[in-house]
Image (spheres, rainbow, N blue to C red):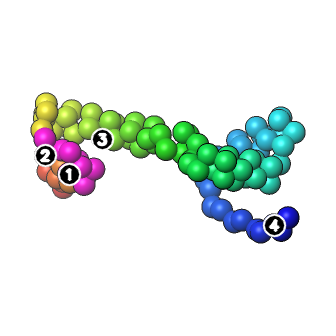
């Protein structure tokens, strides 16, 4: 069996916490990545954790929506369907208030 090197960039805090999990499980990064590759080879799909919506992104979106509604007095506006629209409204309101 031949092997190849895999390089990846991840958030430093995520890596630190993952290092702790791996250490407590007596596993290495290589073992974790090999298990992921074997899973994908066997199932021909990504694990559910990689296909679920990003919870952090959803929470950030909700935080922005709450800020827009609070600052701008908007209750429900279909124009706010995109992050760009909410960012624009927040920027405009901050400029109106604080120049």
Q: Looking at the image, which residue is at 71% across and 50% down?
A: 38
Residue 79, which numbered label?
2
The x and y percentages for residue 36 are 69, 49
Q: Earlier in the sequence, mark 1 or mark 2?
A: 2
Question: Quadrant of residue 75 in the image?
Answer: top left
Q: Looking at the image, which residue is at 87% across and 39% down?
A: 26
Identify the residue under disc 1: 85
Tag 1 near tag 3, CB within 8 Å:
no
Residues drawn in magenta? 78-86
Tag 2 near tag 4, CB within 8 Å:
no
Q: Secondary structure at mark 3?
A: helix
Residue 3, which numbered label?
4
Can residue 57 be seen at all in this image of the molecule? yes
Please count the marks in the image: 4
Query: Callout 3 environment at 10 Å: few (<14), some (14 to 19), or many (20+)?
Result: some
Residue 64, which numbered label?
3
Between 43 and 67, the one nearer to me in the picture: 43
Q: Earlier in the sequence, mark 3 or mark 2?
A: 3
Is 66 magenta? The answer is: no
Query: Callout 1 environment at 10 Å: few (<14), some (14 to 19), or many (20+)?
Result: few
Tag 1 near tag 2, CB within 8 Å:
yes
**Inter-mark Cα distance, 3 to 2:** 14 Å
Is 91 displayed left or right of 44 in the figure?
Answer: left
Q: Earlier in the sequence, mark 4 or mark 3?
A: 4
Q: Earlier in the sequence, mark 1 or mark 4?
A: 4
The x and y percentages for residue 63 are 34, 36
Q: Secondary structure at mark 4?
A: loop
Q: Looking at the image, which residue is at 30% across and 41% down?
A: 64
Q: Nearer the viewer, mark 4 or mark 3?
A: 4
């Amino acid at each position: 069996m031949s092997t190849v090197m895999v390089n990846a960039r991840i958030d430093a805090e995520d890596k630190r916490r993952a290092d702790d999990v791996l250490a407590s499980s007596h596993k290495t990064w290589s073992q974790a990545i090999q298990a992921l590759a074997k899973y994908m080879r066997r199932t021909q799909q990504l694990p559910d954790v990689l296909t679920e919506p990003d919870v952090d992104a959803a929470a950030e979106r909700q935080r922005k929506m709450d800020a827009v509604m609070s600052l701008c007095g908007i209750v429900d506006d279909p124009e706010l369907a995109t992050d760009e629209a909410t960012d624009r409204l927040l920027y405009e309101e901050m400029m109106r208030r604080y120049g």
